[in-house]
Amino acid sequence: FSLLFWQQYFDVDTEDVAVRIKNAIISPMSGTFRDVIGDNPDLWGPFWVCATLIFINALGTKYADYLTHDDSEGDFTFDVTRVSFGVCMFYGYAFCVPAGLWFILRCFGGVNTGLASLLCLYGYSLMVYVPMGILCLAPNQSLRWFAFLPSMAISSAFLFFNVRGVVAESPKGLAFATPFMGCVVGAHACFGLLLKLYWI
């Protein structure tokens, strides 16, 4: 274990992170995220995106619940286990899913892509949920759905178009790419559904 090894993945400045966030939110269908990160994928952005999402979703949604709480139902309580679940959900999705996809790409797809690049891609794909979480502070289900659906669409499009560029390098062609992309979209849909049902 060496800190110098990990230092390269946290060697970004504010401008780098801002450009990556902009690419993820403003132009999700461009499929140019690999060009944006170049040879410098970072874990700084993904780490803080997940931490921010845990904070916003744990406190924000409970705040909305507090606003609508009826005192006749008893005292309002905050369920701390939601924070633990959030850590597992957000960090698990942002780090374990791309690690699994990287393994499949390397071993079965014949694609030599970097693990750090996929981790970076998945971390920044979640950035669009930060403003959504802020909008979900309002105790209005219609507004929450209005915030959630476009966020899910933007995040899904960002992942789809960028992962498609990686999978296109597979020598196995469509026989590998089609089910692989189905798994990517399916996993993201499951994540979104879990996010909506448990947090929002």
Image (cartoon, grey):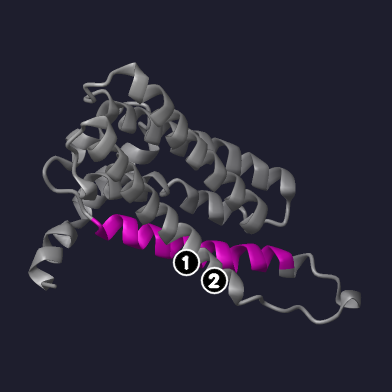
Q: Residue at x 59, y 37 (%)?
A: 149
From the viewer's side, name the closer residue of 20 and 160.
Answer: 160
Q: Is residue 62 left or right of residue 36?
A: right
The span picked out in magenta is 43-65
Q: Residue at x 43, y 36 (%)?
A: 184
Q: Residue at x 26, y 60 (%)?
A: 44
CB of mark 1 within 8 Å of CB of mark 2?
Answer: yes
Quadrant including the N terminus:
bottom left
Quadrant including the C terminus:
bottom right
Query: From what the image shows, is residue 58 above or below residue 170?
Result: below
Looking at the rendered structure, the secondary structure element under dot 2 is helix
> Real-space Cα distance between discs 1 and 2?
6 Å
Residue 87 lies within the magenta run: no
Give the residue pinned by disc 1. Answer: 87
Q: Position of residue 193 (x, y in %)?
A: 61, 45
Give the numbered dot on residue 83. 2
